[in-house]
Amino acid sequence: MIILGIETSCDETALALIEAEGNSVGVLSDITHSQAALHAKYGGVFPNLAKREHSKNLIPLLKTALVESNLISNSSNCLISKQTEKGLAKMLNREPELLAEFLKFIPTIAPPSIDLIAVTEGPGLEPALWVGINFARALSTVWNIPVAPVNHMEGHIVSALLRRSDMNNEGGIKNSVKTDKQALSESSIIHNSEFILHSPSFPALALLISGGHTELVLIKKLGQYETIGETKDDAIGEAFDKVARILGLKYPGGPEISKLAGKARQEKQGSTLESEKRSDLVLPRPMLHSGDYNFSFSGLKTAVLYTVTELPKLTEKIKVALAREFEDAVTEVLTSKTTKAIKKFGIETLIIAGGVIANTHIRASFEELRATAFPSLEFLIPEIPHSTDNALMIAVAGFLRLSRKGDSTKASAEPLLAKGDLRLDEK
Ligand code: KG4
Ligand code: ZN
């Protein structure tokens, strides 16, 4: 079946078209348009700007995705009756720009052979989420296709189950997809890829680390999630972004800190690291011994702020040392809590997903942990381009959800969203 995935929960407008059958996923189109450069001025994501940008981007991206997938045809155009147009105007009344583009483009093409629309229903920024949900509902109305609402965090989990079957890791990547989110100032397009949807052994544990979440989730089987630990304050990606701001680095801060910390690690041979000589540059490891699986990162950010405030001058050398120390501190907390949970719950598969797993040092540390402490543990992480937000993971999660339910879900985003910021174990 062919599935259109739509992701607008934060500052990426992303669309994907996949052809999925059993455990095989063919990617017809996979487009991610990052707004990071626009939000950088505000030092973080500005929800109403994100909403406006999604409204502007969706139709041009849909056009590109359909062309890429060879799903576009104008043989029998999609006529929209006056009554349907009225309904659409109501549905998209908060997105007038999207409505205008929708009414200009959709009637010029035949309804494409898409079987399901999967859309992120949450968690995320509400104004941004609604653009994607309303767009999905509008397409569902004119093309008569069911909509499956998808939990964004389940999408991240699913991203770790995708294994390339074309054995070509660079395969099909056009427009040089970069590791760092902020580098994706233009749309990145990944196409012609083939993936196998891997079935992990259970119980599995997912460590979800993103801009909005830090969670340890116990998975007895796909679709059955229990959050066993979470952050009590800031999410880890948020901490990366805030610390970057304190250090005068641009948004999104994760890749920037990672770059600086990488420099420090390279310099280590000469043992010139500031943090190794100066105890005032040593940061705390919050909640390391709390005895539970929860996290806290806001104190760590405050510690960086105090350190910087007390310095006579924030030199480049100190920035580099602090970035490395920060990365070390969060990595130690993450690996320690995860180790505890793996032991306690007899975990067979460890999944790590969410934007922060794009971090090279965190990836390497977990790989090392598995190799040294848990050699028989299955370890699944998404490839770097699919670590940060994307619509491929949403399309595949929609497919899995449909396979679990055995039937299609009508556009039901509204009542589900009314519950507010959905947690993963609410399913
Ligand atoms: O999953 P994601 O794309 O969006 C959310 O669902 O939140 O995650 C975005 C977060 C941002 O906070 C960003 O700074 C962080 O992921 N991030 C990184 C790296 N790349 C992105 N954090 C650390 N190191 C990276 N290389
Ligand atoms: Zn995300």
Image: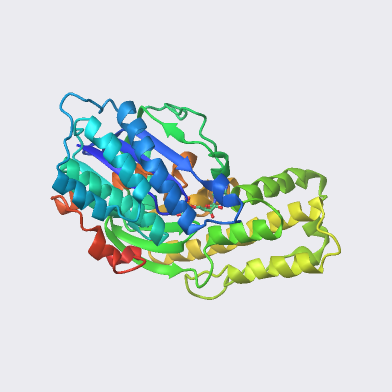
Image quarter in which the N terminus is found: top left
Residue at point 42% right, 60% down?
125
In the rendered image, residue 306, in percent from the top left (x then y), is placed at: 74, 70
Q: Quadrant of the C terminus?
A: bottom left
Task: Name which residue lies at 72% across and 44% down.
Answer: 263
The quadrant where residue 346 appears: bottom left
- Where 196 falls versus 349 (above or below)? above
Closest to the observer, 202 or 107: 107
Judged left or right of residue 56, residue 281 is right
Q: Quadrant of residue 162?
A: top left
Residue placed furthest toward the bottom: 290
* Residue 409 x %, y %: 17, 53
Q: Residue 370, how many percent across, how many down?
A: 50, 51
Q: Position of residue 68 (x, y in %)?
A: 34, 27
Work out whether 280 lies above or below 107: below
Scheme of image coloration: rainbow
Q: Residue furthest front?
A: 82
Please say whether residue 420 is visible from this viewpoint: yes
Task: In this rendered view, identify the residue nearer to me: 21 or 302.
Answer: 302
**Which residue is pictured at 30% across the width and 31% down the height?**
66
Number of marks in the rendered image: 0
Between residue 262 and residue 155, name the one nearer to us: 155
In the image, what residue occupies the spot 42% across and 53% down? 51
Left or right: 42 in relation to 420: right
Residue 362 is at least partly visible in this image: no
